[in-house]
Amino acid sequence: MNPTEIRTEIDNFMLEIGEPCLITRYSAAFSGAGYDNEYVTPTGSLWYTCAHHPVSRSSKGNSAEVEYLEAGRLDQTDQVVFLPGSAVVDANSKVGIGSPTPAQHKILDIGIIDFPVSGTVVYRKAYCRVLNAGSWINQL
């Protein structure tokens, strides 16, 4: 199988087991030279299908997750989200999981981990935290 075929197989698997996922990208903009004139504006949204599960302390789980939990960088209410390799996502994105009204999540500073095969990203993994109602991207 070539990398594109692998990505397609993973995308099809996520369609079978996953949930709707709305990714909204944001960027910071400035409205002048004054103090605190920065504002956040959405730059685009796309629907994908993602798989997710809560972060686990299980010894069978990912050892990096256990280290992040012990260091306080992850909380047990955080989610591990698996996205298609074609998903356009970055640290300034909100990830809405579910339908019809997705629960909004912020991507944590741990980052987005790409899983490439011969240079083609076949899926992505991100650590996310639920945003409280009304929270902006850089607030919790």
Image: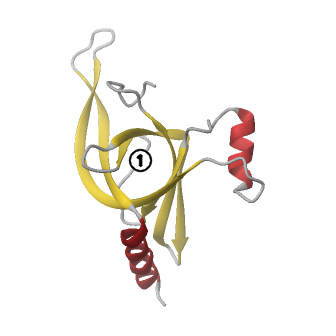
Q: State whether residue 1 is above or below residue 109.
A: below
Q: Nearer the viewer, residue 122 or 100?
A: 100
Q: State whether residue 13 is above or below residue 29.
A: below
Residue extending furthest toward the top: 35
Horizontal relation, residue 121 to residue 102: left or right: right
Residue under the point 32% across and 49% down: 23
Query: Mark 1 falls on what kind of element?
Result: loop
Q: Amino acid at mark 1?
A: Asp
Residue 63 seen in render: yes
- Coordinates of residue 61 in the picture (x, y in percent): 70, 57
- Coordinates of residue 121 in the picture (x, y in percent): 47, 69
Q: Nearer the viewer, residue 29 or 79?
A: 79
Q: State whether residue 99 is above or below residue 5.
A: above
Residue extending furthest toward the right: 59
User: In the rendered view, how is the structure colored?
Assistant: secondary structure
Q: How many marks?
A: 1
Q: State whether residue 80 is above or below residue 73.
A: below
Query: Which residue position is annotated with label 1?
Result: 90
Residue 92 seen in render: no
Horizontal relation, residue 73 to residue 70: left or right: left
Horizontal relation, residue 1 to residue 94: left or right: right
- Coordinates of residue 1 in the picture (x, y in percent): 49, 90
Residue under the point 50% across and 73% down: 119
Residue under the point 28% across and 15% down: 37
Q: Nearer the viewer, residue 13 or 112?
A: 13
Neighbour tally class for label 1: few under 14, some 14-19, many 20 plus, Cα within 10 Å: some
Residue under the point 42% across and 80% down: 9
